[in-house]
Amino acid sequence: MHLRFSLSLALATLTVSSAFADLTSEFSVSNGNPNGSWSYGTKTSPTGVFTAFTNSGAGIISGPTTVDFWGSSPVFNVPSAFKLTAGTLNGYNGGNGGISIGDISLHPGATNQIAVIRYTVATTGLYDISATWGAGDGTSNRGNVDTQLFLNSSSLFSVANTGIGQSFNGTAVALNAGDFLDIQVGKGLDEHFYDSTPVNLAVTQAVPEPASMAALGLGILGFARRRKASRS
């Protein structure tokens, strides 16, 4: 009975649901900065000092287009991190791309301030990482941005001066408690106008494949049988 219980407990431990974080569903302007594992701020260079935004609220971009935002100003301005709550940013002036209601976006500043959303790791482990940058509200001659993902001071992904969507996927990346992932948007080589860029960052704790779990279970069972035989 004791051996069966030990095996069942070990297998149950292996199949615990993974931890999961998703920026789109967890973005908040009402729970402080940082808000749990998420922080919103800016840098003056890709690996520079992270400065947290100190203001949040509801803002108006134009007409009926409204946002919930984090920024350095009490009124909506840039650089900023924001959620589109009404209206549309659908390729201004005939540009490609667009931002939908509910999307989380980053907009860099006029003097090269990079807009950053930071995820801080709570528990050491292996994680799957998914990051996306949409085409945003760019136009044919404006709206190019620098898309970047950093693990602490190391670049995991970077595309300079792009006007099209980008994505990064990392599998079983080793992360330590206290590490941080920074998803960033810089203004690129053109002006900072029309640089609103929808982003998402999802972090999932990697789970062993079923075959690996079964092999480990058989190993535990074999060890238990040998232990029982040695006592006979």
Image (tube, rainbow, N blue to C red):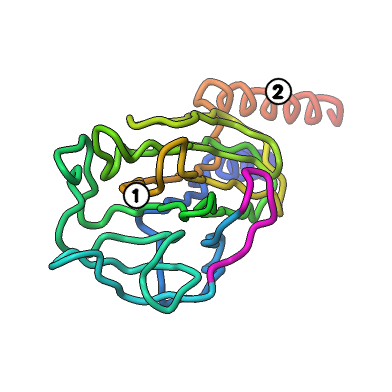
Asked if residue 231 is among those painted magenta in the image, a careful observer would answer: no
What residue sits right under mark 1 in the picture?
193
Q: What range of the chain is rendered magenta?
A: 44-53
Name the residue: 61% across, 21% down: 215
The verdict on residue 52 being magenta is yes
Q: Which residue is mark 2?
A: 222
Q: Residue at x 40, y 62 (%)?
A: 27
Few, some or many residues within 10 Å of mark 1 (<14, 14–19, 20+): some
Q: In the rendered view, would you say 86 is above or below 166?
A: below
Residue 101, image x and y in percent? 21, 56
> In front here: 202 or 157?
157
Residue 21 rendering spot, x and y as whole percentages: 47, 51
Seen at 47% across and 55% down, the residue is 109
Q: Quadrant of the C terminus?
A: top right
Q: Are marks 1 and 2 in contact (CB under 8 Å)?
A: no
Q: Position of residue 204 (x, y in %)?
A: 50, 42
Image quadrant assignment for residue 81: bottom left
In the image, what residue type sits under mark 2?
Gly
Which element is circle 2 on?
A: helix
Q: Nearer the viewer, residue 4 or 161?
A: 161
Q: Secondary structure at mark 1?
A: loop
Towards the viewer: 31 or 204: 31
Q: Position of residue 104 (x, y in %)?
A: 35, 54
Task: Give the CA distance from mark 1 to mark 2.
Answer: 65 Å
**Three-letter code for the amino acid on which mark 1 is drawn:** Phe
Main secondary structure type of the part rendered in magenta: loop
